[in-house]
Image: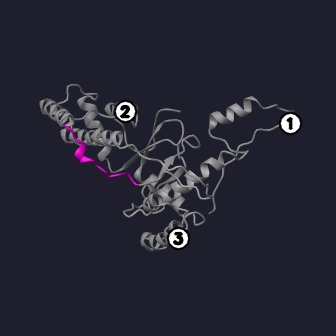
Amino acid sequence: MKGIFNLSNKILTRSETSVLNKGLKFAPSNRLDKFGVFIDLQRFKRKLSLKKYFLKQPVEREVVQNCTPNVHTTLKNRSKFYPRHMVSDEIKMFEGLVMKDIEKLSTKLDKQNLTKEERMALKDLQKDPNIIIKPADKGGGIVIWSKESYKEEALRLLDDNSTYTKLTKDPVSEIRHKLIPFLQEGLDKNILNKSEFDYLSIEFTKVPHFYILPKVHKDPLKPPGRPIVAGIDSISSRLSEYVDVLLQPLVCKIPSHLKDTISMLQLLKGAIWQKGDLLVTCDVHSYI
């Protein structure tokens, strides 16, 4: 069901249609970011130093004698360790040569992947305050919603009191006040190790972002929205990740577990059908 679903009053120009047909994952060519290249070079320099450090000082792994019922994960904060004394003359020479090559590079684009008209059309679409552009929930299409219609559908979903509760204040501080002692208890009882404790004790959090994707496969003219809460780096995101890591091996052992659509098709391929059998699908709605 690929295509452009224009549900707004905006009349698309030929250039705007051409840009949208390239897809929402299309990356316009940009000028060379020399500072970005420099940052990547420093990261690579650190990576080389770490490889050299651990090559000379291999990590000793403890042999577990007695198995405990507590299962620890590999979750931990990203290491900031940088063995600068391992930055050899060879690495410094490599860095210097690359920096010279970077300075010789032109910041001008040799080849554009958008015409001048398409680039202007892209800017106009980005700056238009009256429309919202989203990928379709299924089928790979692109939907142009009027801002009012998008807001109306979002509020309709948020008005579901069985799913959402309106808050009078930001609850993050209160949640953190309860979470830290809970994690400390897990550390004291060896349910969590120190790396897990530090990882789960997220200090700087983000407010989850709510948005909707249009279900044009259900109604192409007035599609209902699929609500999505993007909670990356929210107060509970890492705790959810921890629970997911622990439960994944167990979920796979449940007889009714289906990994994906391909897994379902493989099961159906080997099924023995009897007269009167029905294949039924259903939607699951959470009331938690």
Dot 1: within a 10 Å radius of its alpha carbon, few (fewer than 14), some, or many (20 or more) residues?
A: few
- Cα separation, mark 1 vs mark 3, equals 55 Å
Residue 231 at x, y = what percent? 46, 56
Which secondary structure lies at badge 1? loop
Q: The disc labelled 3 sits on which kind of residue?
A: Glu
- Cα separation, mark 3 vs mark 2, equals 57 Å
Mark 1 or 3 closer to N-term? 3
Residue 56 vs 22, above or below: the answer is: below
Question: What residue does disc 2 label?
Answer: 17
Question: What residue does disc 3 label?
Answer: 185
**Residue at 36% across, 37% down:** 12
Residue 58, picture quadrant = top left
Mark 3 or 2 closer to N-term? 2
Frontmost residue, 34 versus 114: 34
Identify the magenta region: 77-88
Between circles 2 and 1, the one closer to the viewer is: 1
Q: The disc labelled 2 sits on which kind of residue?
A: Thr
Principal secondary structure, stretch drawn in magenta: loop
- Tally of marks: 3
Task: Identify the mark at residue 276; answer none if there is no mark.
Answer: 1
Residue 242 at x, y = what percent? 52, 56
**Residue at 65% across, 48% down:** 251
Magenta-colored stretch includes residue 78: yes
